[in-house]
């Protein structure tokens, strides 16, 4: 996907939606942290500044949340960073690779929590940011399909680059136009050649081979969400962005999550974002779409940031986490009854224990330098 092709497809999307207020929910009406993120691009090299834009010095906080990094966890993180470095060198000019340590470990924390959800075969993510999560999800054999939705051109292209790298031919881009499909256009050359008795000298008909492919990841721009609404998912994620939408967009995407989740599915957010919608308003908007909170786990209990939220086994989250159950879930009524307490976490709940690693053994502490050294050794 390139900038010109994206904008052509988006232009057709604007024309097909035909309602300016509907367009404003997803497109130019989207408000993202005071426009701190570039919406439009003049060059794909501008994507480089996005690679670790959003994860403010939280590497140690995530190591703490994970209870240290076991050899397995260290191996997963290093492997993802090595593949990321290879991705960067294949797509951008600089030979010095920016290493998004905080960004990558935050996405690893998401991937680890997903492993605690037994039914995670079909996943939808709303707003995947820089797309680093794909370096982990593409390696999870329990995930049949990972679909994602993005409204911003810059992030869409960043995610697109990553997904093409990690999924290869198993990736489908719904913003990409297929000009070869029937009815799109043509010049009826074969008919004219037959009428004329020949048009081109040394004419050789082009040969095509129809090849089927197994799609493991699909990317949707905002003007293709009708197709998403017809699908069903085990997990819907909306990480670090619920407060960053405008309120109409938040209502829309909460409704979309409620529509596409399977009855026993999970809607989940690691971090609510740093936007203008108050966190309490974001949470009540999600609940108003037909969800009951299973867990709402803050980093601290008060605004001073001094009182850590008490969790079993000394756990403390690096970021606020919220888990919701859809109406129709076997435990919806129970979760709705228990939703008044805060922080909300049932340490006896199997799903909660699995997602947040409450039974994980303590592992060695690893530093940024440990990780960088291991990555450099692998790349040497």
Image (spheres, rainbow, N blue to C red):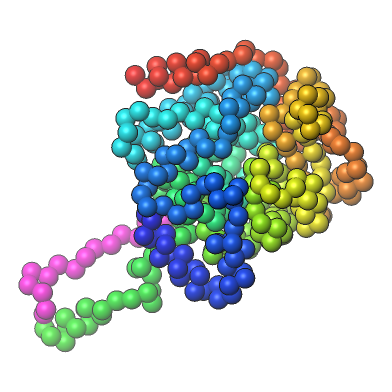
Residue appearing at x 81%, y 45% in the figure: 293
List x then y, in percent, for residue 340: 90, 43
54 relative to 1, above or below: above
The stretch in magenta equals: 198-213
Answer left or right for 2 relative to 141: left
Q: Quadrant of residue 91?
A: top left
Q: Quadrant of the N terminus?
A: bottom left
83 relative to 72, above or below: below
Question: Relative to the observer, which residue lies in front, 235 or 368?
Answer: 368
Answer left or right for 284 relative to 87: right
**211 in the magenta segment:** yes
In this view, which residue lies farthest toward the top? Answer: 364
In this view, which residue lies farthest toward the bottom? Answer: 195
Residue 203 visible to an observer of this rendering: yes
List x then y, in percent, for residue 353: 77, 30
Residue appearing at x 45%, y 70% in the figure: 12
List x then y, in percent, for residue 42: 37, 52
34 relative to 352, above or below: below
Residue appearing at x 78%, y 51% in the figure: 281
Q: Quadrant of residue 59?
A: top right
Residue appearing at x 73%, y 37% in the figure: 321
Answer left or right for 116 relative to 349: left
**273 in the magenta segment:** no
* Count of numbered tags: 0
Residue 120 visible to an observer of this rendering: no
Question: Relative to the observer, which residue lies in front, 73 or 198?
Answer: 73
List x then y, in percent, for residue 175: 46, 60
Q: Quadrant of the C terminus?
A: top left
Most frequent secondary structure within the magenta stretch: loop
């Amino acid at each position: 996907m390139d900038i010109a092709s994206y904008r052509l497809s988006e232009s057709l999307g604007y024309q097909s939606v035909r309602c300016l207020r509907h367009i404003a929910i997803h497109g130019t009406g989207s408000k993202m942290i005071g426009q701190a993120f570039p919406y439009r691009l003049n060059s794909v090299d501008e994507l480089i500044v996005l690679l670790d834009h959003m994860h403010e010095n939280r590497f140690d906080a995530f190591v703490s949340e994970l209870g240290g990094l076991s050899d397995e966890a260290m191996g997963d993180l290093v492997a993802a960073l090595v593949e990321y470095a290879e991705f960067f060198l294949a797509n951008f000019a600089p030979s010095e690779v920016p290493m998004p340590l905080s960004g990558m470990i935050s996405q690893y924390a998401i991937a680890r929590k997903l492993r605690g959800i037994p039914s995670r075969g079909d996943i939808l993510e709303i707003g995947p940011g820089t797309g680093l999560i794909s370096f982990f999800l593409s390696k999870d054999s329990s995930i049949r399909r990972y679909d994602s939705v993005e409204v911003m051109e810059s992030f869409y292209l960043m995610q697109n680059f990553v997904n093409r790298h990690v999924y290869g031919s198993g990736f489908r881009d719904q913003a990409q136009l297929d000009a070869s499909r029937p009815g799109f256009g043509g010049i009826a050359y074969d008919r004219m050649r037959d009428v004329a008795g020949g048009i081109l000298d040394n004419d050789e008909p082009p040969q095509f081979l129809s090849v089927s492919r197994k799609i493991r990841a699909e990317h949707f721009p905002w003007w293709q969400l009708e197709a998403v609404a017809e699908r069903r998912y085990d997990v819907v994620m909306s990480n670090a962005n619920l407060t960053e939408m405008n309120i109409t967009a938040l209502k829309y995407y909460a409704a979309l999550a409620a529509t596409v989740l399977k009855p026993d599915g999970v809607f989940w957010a690691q971090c609510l974002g740093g936007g203008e919608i108050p966190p309490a308003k974001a949470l009540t908007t999600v609940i108003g779409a037909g969800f009951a909170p299973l867990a709402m786990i803050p980093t601290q209990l008060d605004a001073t940031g001094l009182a850590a939220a008490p969790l079993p086994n000394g756990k403390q989250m690096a970021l606020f986490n919220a888990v919701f159950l859809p109406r129709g879930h076997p435990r919806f009524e129970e979760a709705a009854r228990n939703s008044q307490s805060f922080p909300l976490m049932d340490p006896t709940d199997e799903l909660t224990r699995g997602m947040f690693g409450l039974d994980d053994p303590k592992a060695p502490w690893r530093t940024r330098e440990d990780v960088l050294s291991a990555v450099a050794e692998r790349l040497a």
